[in-house]
Amino acid sequence: MVVFVNRLANDDASAFIVRTHPARTAKLLVIFTAKSTELVVFAPYLTMEPDLHLFTPENLLEQASTAEEHLGYKILSFYVDDAGILSKSVTQHRATFYLSPSGGTLRDEHLNIVLYSAKFDLYKGFGRA
């Protein structure tokens, strides 16, 4: 199993958030304090909101369910790497993408096709008798 750990630190303490997937709810929060040898562990009731800007099919569908529409496209935002490619990890850059809800096509800000999947067709099944 792959484990993703985020480290949060200040002068007094360090905290490690442990997840089994970068966009999922944290499974464990461990806090180390500099002034004590005590280890504080909070689990499993820690709830953290998933970062919907990490690209996963689930995050795309979640954003699409509440996204603003313009000219028939759902406007979405995801982290991208330096080359403008969708990222599954947090980066310094976010870009705007457009989802055509009838057809399942995701386009970049220049309307180039980034990916297509019938899974993203929000209207599939409508119009069938």
Image: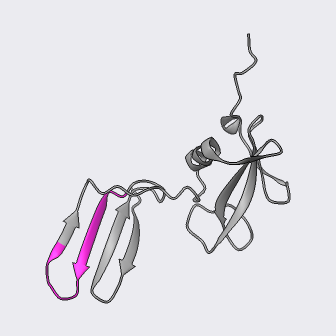
Task: Give the quarter of the figure containing the C terminus.
Answer: top right
Q: Is residue 19 left or right of residue 30?
A: right
Q: Is residue 64 above or below residue 49?
A: above
Residue 27 in magenta stretch: yes
Please give the range of residues in magenta. Answer: 26-39
> Residue placed at 58% from the left, 60% from the top?
88
Q: Is residue 80 left or right of residue 34?
A: right
Q: Is residue 9 left or right of residue 37?
A: right
Residue 70 in magenta stretch: no
Task: Give the quarter of the figure containing the N terminus.
Answer: bottom left
Residue 13 rendering spot, x and y as whole percentages? 28, 82
Residue 45 rendering spot, x and y as whole percentages? 26, 53
Q: Is residue 18 above or below residue 61?
A: below
Image quadrant in which you'd find residue 73 = top right
Residue 21 rendering spot, x and y as whole percentages? 45, 56
Which residue is more in the foreground, 57 or 49? 49
> Residue placed at 74% from the left, 55% from the top?
97
Coloration of the structure image? one colour
> Residue placed at 74% from the left, 38% from the top?
101
Image quadrant in which you'd find residue 72 = top right
> Residue placed at 29% from the left, 65% from the top?
29
Residue 46 rendering spot, x and y as whole percentages? 30, 57
